[in-house]
Image: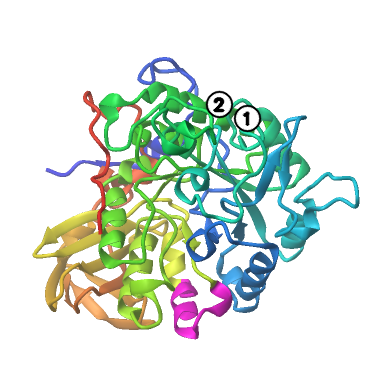
């Protein structure tokens, strides 16, 4: 027997999904609901991040060329509004605690001959173009490039203390500068500084960096201080809300699915990584997809699972691999994942721009209901995901073939929570074609590594209500029943 909720109860669940998490016992009724502001991330953020294309060797020219291409190509009008900076922008931390910007690669940051620097000229230019601007930092004392990119020409300089450019000890000062003085709208907060600078690290032993006792260990939660990691990000989120009380700032938590972040990240930030960094390889994309594909209960308006920026335009998802690129985009869209491009978009071939600019697919990702797609069928290397859309009776359906052979798949109305024996409209979102009306289900042929993506409109099985499985975006997982913390994601080694 199916259970479903009538509309008034659904609306109550929608309110509770945004309830502030200030209570000591999250299962105790408060007697009132308070709504967390989700103005900036009511739908998954869309934009561009330079890391996969340039790593730390990014500069102002590359940023502005990419922004111009995104605007001129129509991608900005399609919703790609965030132009973000990643690691490599800093020079050092000064005696007054302020971070100096590396003006050799960001010349507009120099304020005359004062020796002071500011990103305000850059963010003003991006805002004038209609974009929002994002910045990168780390929750520890040092950043990821200082540990993992030791030969970069753009690492912080100076003494050990001057090279400590992370937030640790400077959270309020740095965030105030980033958002109030420099005018940023989005911040990605990494976590290498919390785990990669242990005493046995060669650079620490050599005296380049101060030892930082790890607060978590990758893939080993039993050796991690999980509450300490959450406490840091809770403080960052709280300060950001105080600095931007109107709720129009985005906090991206980058703990790679570690430190039990599944449980707490949605309380403090707007999106959180569910896996290690993506690589432009098919198996890496699958790994990152899998890290988020069963987490639908944790996602919703203002709080999104983030399997990392897209690898479209690179490697096995470039212009020579368009089927795989379309699959990548289809999966991130139905997952309600952030759609952040991560390649040199200024040199993008038109075929890749067409994929990224498919407005019908983008509309699935940006649907106002905020539900993440749910896996309803899995067999023989094929997965069917269904996402309930805001309009009554509308479903997005992805039929994903992970394998190397052609597959024939039957999609049934009960899988979509549509009424059996009825007909439904079917729209192919890649072919931009209305198919013949289907009755009771749909037969789908799917090529190797292909994803077919449809919008199906029919008569909802629950009538004016919803089944719980249809509305994960409106459910608040206060306590998930996990009593022993296991690694959230297996280690990818490709």
Residue 183 showing in the rendered view: yes
Tell me if residue 451 comes above or below residue 34 in the rendering.
below
Residue 244 showing in the rendered view: no
Range drawn in magenta? 345-359
C-beta proximity under 8 Å, tags 1 and 2: yes
Q: Position of residue 92 (x, y in %)?
A: 68, 41
Q: How far apart are labels 1 and 2 at the CA level?
A: 8 Å
Q: Position of residue 256 (x, y in %)?
A: 38, 43
- Name which quarter of the figure residue 300 lies in: top left
In this view, which residue lies farthest toward the right? 113
Query: In this image, 229 relative to 4: left or right?
Result: right
Residue located 56% across and 70% down the image = 78
Query: In this image, 61 relative to 449: left or right?
Result: right
Q: Position of residue 422 (x, y in %)?
A: 20, 68
Q: Position of residue 16 (x, y in %)?
A: 43, 32
Whichever of labels 1 and 2 marks the residue nearer the N terminus, that label is 1
Identify the colour scheme used: rainbow
Residue located 59% across and 33% down the image = 167
Mark 1 secondary-structure assignment? helix
**Is 357 covered by the magenta stretch?**
yes
Tell me if residue 325 comes above or below residue 248 in the rendering.
below
List the residue tagged with mark 1. 171
Total label count?
2
In this view, which residue lies farthest toward the front? 206
Q: Which mark is residue 235?
A: 2
**Is 216 covered by the magenta stretch?**
no
Query: In this image, 132 relative to 103: left or right?
Result: left
Q: Nearer the viewer, residue 26 or 315?
A: 315
**1 or 2: mark nearer the eye:** 1
């Amino acid at each position: 027997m199916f259970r479903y909720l009538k509309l008034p109860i659904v609306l109550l669940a929608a309110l509770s999904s945004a309830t502030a998490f200030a209570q000591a016992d999250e299962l105790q009724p408060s007697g009132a609901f308070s709504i967390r502001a989700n103005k900036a991330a009511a739908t998954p953020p869309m934009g561009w991040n330079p890391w996969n294309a340039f790593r730390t060797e990014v500069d102002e020219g590359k940023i502005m060329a990419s922004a111009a291409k995104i605007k001129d190509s129509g991608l900005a009008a399609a919703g790609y509004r965030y132009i973000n900076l990643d690691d490599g922008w800093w020079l050092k931390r000064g005696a007054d605690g302020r971070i100096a910007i590396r003006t050799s690669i960001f010349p507009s940051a120099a304020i005359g001959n004062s020796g002071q620097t500011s990103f305000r000229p850059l963010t003003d230019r991006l805002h004038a173009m209609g974009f929002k601007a994002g910045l990168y930092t780390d929750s520890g004392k040092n950043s990821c490039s200082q540990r993992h990119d030791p030969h970069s020409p753009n690492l912080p300089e100076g003494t050990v203390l001057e090279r400590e450019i992370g937030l640790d000890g400077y959270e309020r000062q740095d965030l105030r500068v980033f958002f109030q003085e420099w005018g940023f709208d989005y911040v990605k907060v990494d976590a290498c500084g919390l785990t990669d600078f242990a005493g046995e690290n060669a650079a620490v032993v050599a005296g380049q960096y101060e030892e930082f006792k790890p607060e978590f260990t990758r893939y080993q939660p039993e050796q991690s201080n999980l509450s300490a990691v959450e406490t840091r990000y809770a403080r960052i989120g709280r300060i950001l809300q105080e600095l931007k009380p109107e709720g129009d700032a985005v906090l991206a938590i980058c703990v790679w699915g570690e430190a039990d972040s599944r449980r707490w990240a949605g309380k403090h930030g707007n999106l959180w990584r569910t896996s290690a960094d993506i690589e432009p390889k098919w198996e890496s994309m699958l790994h990152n997809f899998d890290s988020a594909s069963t987490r639908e209960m944790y996602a919703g308006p203002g709080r999104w699972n983030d399997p990392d920026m897209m690898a479209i335009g690179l490697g096995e998802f470039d212009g020579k691999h368009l089927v795989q690129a379309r699959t990548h985009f289809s999966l991130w869209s139905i997952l309600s994942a952030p759609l952040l491009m991560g390649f040199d978009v200024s040199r993008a071939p038109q075929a890749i721009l067409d994929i990224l600019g498919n407005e019908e697919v983008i509309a699935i990702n940006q649907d106002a209901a905020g539900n993440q797609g749910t896996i309803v069928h899995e067999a023989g290397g094929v997965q069917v995901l269904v996402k309930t859309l805001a309009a009554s009776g509308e479903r997005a359906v992805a039929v994903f073939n992970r394998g190397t052979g052609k597959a024939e798949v039957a999609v049934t109305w009960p899988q979509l929570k549509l009424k059996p024996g009825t007909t439904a409209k079917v729209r192919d979102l890649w072919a931009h074609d209305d198919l013949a009306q289907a009755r009771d289900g749909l037969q789908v042929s799917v090529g190797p590594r292909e994803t077919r993506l449809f919008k199906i409109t029919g008569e909802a099985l629950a009538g004016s209500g919803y089944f719980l499985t249809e509305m994960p975006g409106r459910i608040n997982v206060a306590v998930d029943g996990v009593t022993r913390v296991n690694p959230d994601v297996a280690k990818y080694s490709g």
